[in-house]
């Protein structure tokens, strides 16, 4: 019996019945026509309802058992360790895009022996996996980390910012950073501050479905990110992810205003309370917001981050001890996620007061996610203002945390740090406009 | 100069010019007709652009300066401390609804001397403030607490649950609980567990704009809540708040599935990933979901809560010390808000492992809010499962916290507590259905 790793259930039985193994070239008859391709192993999430073939184009296609009428082995495979199809030529004269890998699965390939997903490490591999890239740009892939995004820390933000700053000097036209979606929003916010004024587009991109899955969002997200990095006439830090569940439009979000608001949907990322920076369709940018910074401005990055900031979400009966613990573990700034307009209980307020008196900076955001803090409405809010709590308006809690670590990284303290936190530095907050 | 408390800016100048004072009956000519009413003081949020009159109907109306062409004092007021218009008769035979006040501003009135908002404390006052209530039900108001909702704690949940349980024995047809919106979602979830199987409707209601503001949502929310409590043919714990920004439809949310997702909009509350329980229009219930429990089932409340649960939101470089602090401050259950499908860094995972080994229960939810945890996708998630972390699927983090405090309150520990946390007890979680 040949290798059918990752297959299970009805799909496994069908392939066994046909005498197929991973690496074989199969001819599959479906309700909508015949498909020929190399059988690839399933990965992680694999259900028992699909057969996945790698087509000559380099793409994988997932075929639903419901549609399959017949499976035939047309050639026994050599079971290659990995033999990408030859990449298309990438004409000289196209824009240059640096594609930095951090461990997300977006620019990955399957290792045919283990079934594991591994990052594409050479330019040829990357272009052979997503052939359209060659029409868009000369891509230089570079793997910086290979870690799960939940382990990305401020020290990684610093390394990424340094690398992008260097790329600007290397006359790269744009940078794409592939990143696991879990903490993509935090990293996008962090880089927005570290790279404020960056003269080229820096586009973070991820995938909600790994590349071997039927209907992965990885190829299109990556094409859009590279296309925007290569050709957009604006600069700054952005996130490129599916606009909706269909596979034809990519939302370009501002790096400080984006949040992963769904665990699994392809359009999980949303711009909160602000319009999208741009929308990309298969023909290029379809819509670009007004007022985005143009390419080629001055640029003096401040790439250091200091982990001495904590994010605490308030909840009923939250013990003050959590505030004290954040302080003891080295937090010089505490970002509170208060309720509603930015409220916390008397017990927590008391601890914040003592934190501020000892020289700490306490900032208020809202766990509502949408809307903005307003501590002037209720007495308890006014008390927070009087004790020195800084309210951050419509700044997202996650963005506020990244910003606080950046502010500390600049060396700013006291009033200077407070001023930096309150000001709009990278589109992270807008002045209050509602009439009251 | 008469009392014009709360007025400022252009509105203050206009009223001073007319020789008006709070309590005077004014005739105001506007672009759309003349309005006669008693001048009431402004409160808190008051801008300088509106004049607020109390009409004979008992309602307040806010008139924009833009629309006002003339202000005339038609009678000097007696400046009453508070003299509600006589309430309409409440015919016998209407359903009886207990309206419990906890300190929210929804059923409040302005104290004409201080400008402060005070809860309506008698049935007459309540009905005179919202005259339509008399057509809907016989309302018995009862003030249980008068605190800001951010200070509501599990001990208050227990008192509320006890009071509702007693009301069931008193042959009340339904219960309405007015509550500040900040922690309304937490309290709704808590009562959903404590009152699981309650044979009547229990409707929590709040207001995003205080009752003296032009376009307050308070009256309609309250009318809808009382109407549903009085007449709905279903039972259980719900939240009644504006469906959208217009003032004609009220969403009835399931108590375990609702979240305040905006700081200030009237439709700030949303049912997350589940359909609304019902929609109420001015004519009554317009739409009711299938499968809601009918009135009049068995009922054995378990009203105790134990504060020994903590909610921690994960963030990049979160120190393990925060997990240890939660444990040291008495947490027997920790609800983590992980990233994406439910992930945390290696450092936090290590602390959770040690917490579990010492007898604690660690549960995983997602900070994405929408979607569901799935720890089976990545190795790091599977590690969390192996170390005993319980994933809670699509349970909201806030609901999970309230549930954990309730589970502890029942006295359940170990496997029994774990089973209670995982099971669906009050509509708080649904089985996973997506194909993988």
Image: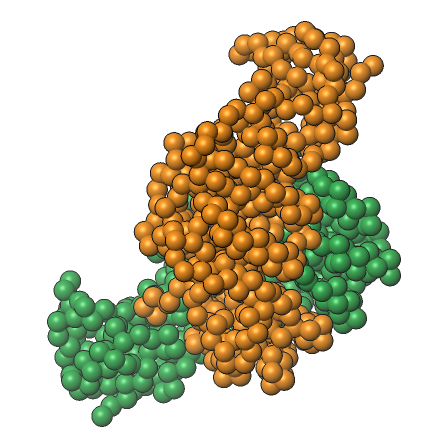
Chain colours: A green, B orange
- Left or right placement of residue A23 versus residue B40 in this view: left
Which is nearer the eye, A125 or B435?
B435
Q: On the rendered image, what quadrant is the N terminus of chain B found in?
A: top right
- Residue ID at (41%, 51%): B235
Tell me where residue A146 appears, x and y as whole percent. Answer: 54, 77
In the image, residue A130 above or below residue A297: below
In the image, residue B81 above or below residue A214: above
Tell me where residue B400 appears, x and y as whole percent. Answer: 53, 64
Tell me where residue A73 appears, x and y as whole percent. Answer: 16, 82
The outermost residue toward the bottom is A1
In the image, residue B171 above or below residue A266: above
- Left or right placement of residue A156 versus residue B292 in this view: right
Tell me where residue A153 appears, x and y as whole percent. Answer: 64, 70
- Residue ID at (16%, 84%): A17
- Left or right placement of residue B272 versus residue B311 in this view: left
Which is nearer the eye, A84 or A355?
A355
Residue B375: tell me if it is visible.
yes
The outermost residue toward the right is A358
Q: On the rendered image, what quadrant is the C terminus of chain B found in?
A: bottom left
Number of marks? 0
Q: Quadrant of residue A42?
A: bottom left
Residue A301: tell me if it is visible.
no
Which is nearer the eye, B128 or A276?
B128
Which is nearer the eye, B326 or B114?
B114
- Residue ID at (66%, 17%): B38
Q: Quadrant of residue B347?
A: bottom right
- Residue ID at (23%, 78%): A11
In the image, residue B166 above or below residue A307: above
């Amino acid at each position: 019996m040949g290798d059918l790793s990752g297959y299970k259930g009805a799909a496994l039985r069908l392939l066994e019945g046909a005498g197929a193994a991973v690496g074989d070239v199969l001819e599959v008859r479906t309700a909508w026509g015949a498909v020929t391709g190399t059988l690839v192993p399933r990965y992680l999430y694999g259900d028992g309802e699909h057969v996945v073939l790698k087509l000559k184009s380099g793409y994988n296609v997932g075929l639903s058992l419901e549609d399959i009428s017949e499976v035939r082995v047309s050639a026994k495979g050599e079971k290659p360790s990995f033999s990408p199809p030859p990449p298309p030529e990438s004409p000289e004269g196209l824009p240059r895009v640096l594609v930095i890998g951090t461990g997300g699965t977006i620019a990955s390939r399957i290792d045919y022996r283990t079934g594991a997903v591994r990052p594409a490490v050479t330019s040829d591999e990357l272009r052979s996996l997503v052939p359209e890239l060659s029409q868009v740009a000369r891509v230089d892939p570079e793997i910086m980390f290979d870690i799960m995004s939940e382990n990305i820390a401020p020290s990684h933000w610093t390394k990424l910012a340094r690398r992008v700053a260097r790329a600007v000097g290397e006359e790269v036209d744009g940078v794409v950073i592939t990143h696991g979606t879990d903490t993509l929003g935090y990293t996008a916010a962090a880089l927005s501050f570290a790279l404020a004024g960056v003269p080229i587009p820096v586009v973070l991109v991820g995938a909600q479905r790994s590349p071997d899955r039927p209907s992965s969002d990885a190829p299109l997200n990556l094409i859009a990110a590279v296309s925007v990095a290569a050709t957009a006439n604006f600069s700054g830090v952005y996130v490129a992810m599916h606009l909706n569940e269909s596979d034809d439009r990519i939302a370009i979000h501002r790096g400080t205003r984006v949040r992963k608001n769904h665990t699994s949907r392809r359009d999980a990322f949303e711009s909160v309370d602000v319009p999208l920076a741009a929308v990309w369709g298969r023909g290029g940018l379809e819509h670009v917001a007004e007022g985005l910074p143009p390419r080629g401005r001055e640029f003096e990055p401040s790439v250091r981050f200091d982990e001495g900031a904590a994010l605490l979400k308030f909840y009923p009966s939250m013990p003050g001890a959590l505030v004290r613990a954040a302080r003891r573990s080295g937090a010089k700034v505490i970002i509170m996620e208060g309720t509603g307009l930015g409220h916390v209980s008397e017990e927590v307020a008391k601890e914040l007061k003592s934190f501020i008196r000892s020289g700490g900076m306490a900032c208020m955001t809202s766990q509502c996610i949408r809307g903005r803090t307003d501590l002037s409405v209720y007495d308890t809010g006014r008390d927070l203002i009087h004790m020195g709590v800084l309210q951050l308006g419509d700044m997202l809690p996650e963005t506020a945390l990244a910003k606080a670590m950046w502010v500390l990284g600049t060396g700013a303290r006291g009033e200077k740090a407070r001023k930096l936190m309150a000001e709009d530095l990278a589109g992270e907050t807008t002045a209050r406009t509602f009439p009251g």
